[in-house]
Image (cartoon, rainbow, N blue to C red):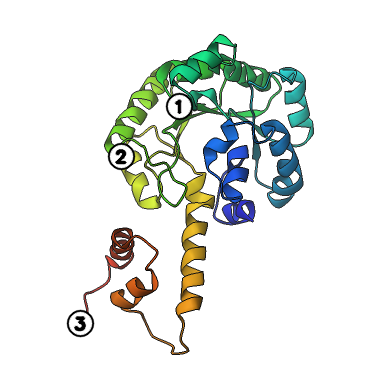
Amino acid sequence: MTARCAVRGGADFILALSAGHFRQIGLGSFSSLLCYANSNELVMTFGTRELLPAASDTPVIFGLNATDPTIRLYDYLKKIKERGFAGINNFPTVGLIDGEFGKALEQEGITFEREVEAVRLVSFLGLFTVAFVFEKEQARAMIEAGADVICVHLGLTVGGHKGDRKFVSIELARMKMDDIMDYCERLKPGIIQLVYGGPISKPEDMPYFYRNPYCSGYIGGSAFERIPVEKALTETVQAFRSYDGRLEAEDTVCQKLLRRRCVDDVQFMKEYIEEKFGEPVVK
């Protein structure tokens, strides 16, 4: 359903990520980094059965767990191509893992370099590559490997019930994006550069990031298929429960607040102001 809606909305491509599956069943995106399922098998299953048929005229990009030690990487990439996927994206990515756990994984050979190698191999096969990067050196490695798109990953998306509670400010996120994108432009002028996640959770956030001339677009996960659904379903159920048979032309703020007792009032007021900001004030 989300793939079809995204296509109708004008999406340039669809990402088939295991994180999306976990979000759809009410879990957080970090579930895709744990052993709750085999990420590659999961993506292969719902990607071929659900996304490819639903988005037949839109490229579907396979979210590849390149560090999976149980696959022969090149053979698996050929399988991805044979199934009809247009390319790969390095997700789940060890770029999200830091600290002692990250060091332990690196000692085991579970590294970002493995994701870079996947991009290099799949580029040889003629598929499209969207590379998540978290710092300049990773971006350089992905560009040298032949990545078609560099996407600056700002961390998990804020907002909603499952959104990241620990995140950088929108100003610091913009500074990080600028630093990486300016560096990439110097390395390979004209390369497509996108941004993902972090404090960007609604369309109103993007103009601030589009001030950078090298930012060509936004990749959305939670911002497209979790947060809008959470909001729409919550408000629809509350509206059905509160409807008393009287058709009102328009609810007052107080009426809406009374119906939204379980929703944060401050967040509601912010959303209401955004929605009504351009309308004239009436008594």
**Mark 1 vs 2, N-terminal side:** 2
The amino acid sitting under disc 3 is Lys
| Residue 110 image point, x, y percent | 59, 16
The structure residue drawn at horizontal position 37% and vertical position 68%, both measured from the top left corner, is 261
Alpha-carbon distance for marks 3 and 2? 35 Å
The amino acid sitting under disc 2 is Ile
Compared with residue 65, is residue 145 higher up or lower down, i.e. above or below?
Answer: above
The structure residue drawn at horizontal position 62% and vertical position 38%, both measured from the top left corner, is 18
User: Left or right: where does residue 52 sit relative to residue 108?
Assistant: right
Which is nearer the eye, 166 or 128? 166
Compared with residue 65, is residue 251 higher up or lower down, i.e. above or below?
Answer: below
Q: Seen from this angle, which residue lies furthest bottom?
A: 246
Badges 3 and 1: C-beta atoms under 8 Å apart?
A: no
Q: Is residue 202 in view from this perspective? A: yes
| Residue 60 image point, x, y percent | 66, 40
User: Left or right: where does residue 142 sit relative to residue 184?
Assistant: right
Compared with residue 210, is residue 243 higher up or lower down, i.e. above or below?
Answer: below
In the image, which disc is placed on residue 190?
Answer: 1
Q: Seen from this angle, which residue lies furthest top?
A: 107
Which is nearer the eye, 46 or 151? 46
- Tag 1's secondary structure? loop
**Circle 3 residue:** 283
Alpha-carbon distance for marks 3 and 1? 52 Å
- Tag 2's secondary structure? helix
